[in-house]
Amino acid sequence: MSKTTHTGEVVGPSEVEEFRRDGAVPLRKLISLSNIKALSEAVDHLMERPSARAKVATAVGDRGEFLEDFCNWPEIDAFRRVALHGPLPAAAATLM
């Protein structure tokens, strides 16, 4: 995976304006499908083997499952790779 420092057409002036106005902005096509797949697999793995920091936040009778598991990005390659070496850091810097 290449280290991207350019967000291309994904983060432009209109996205920066929207982020400053609303505090959030959708950035479609920022993360590649291969990285989305890797992140999905990492989440599945984490759901099956939560860390000692994990908390189940689903009440009895709730539909679905919600697990909070904190500070795993340094330990899980897909999380670390996408967070540090993909287009996310440059996008965040542009928006901030």
Image (cartoon, rainbow, N blue to C red):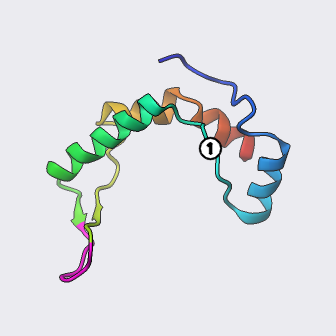
- Percent position of residue 40, x then y: 34, 42
Q: Quadrant of residue 90?
A: top right
Three-letter amino acid code at the position of disc 1: Arg
In the image, is residue 53 part of the stretch drawn in magenta? no
Q: Residue at x 30, y 61 (%)?
A: 68
In the image, is residue 62 part of the stretch drawn in magenta? yes
- Percent position of residue 65, x then y: 25, 67
Q: Which residue is mark 1?
A: 28
Q: Residue at x 73, y 28 (%)?
A: 8
Res. 50 in view: no
Secondary-structure class at tag 1: loop
Q: Residues within 10 Å of mark 1 (few under 14, many from 20)?
A: few
Q: Residue at x 35, y 33 (%)?
A: 38
Compared with 29, 69 (above or below) is: below
Res. 52 in view: yes
Q: Which residues are magenta?
A: 56-63
For the stretch drawn in magenta, the main secondary structure is loop
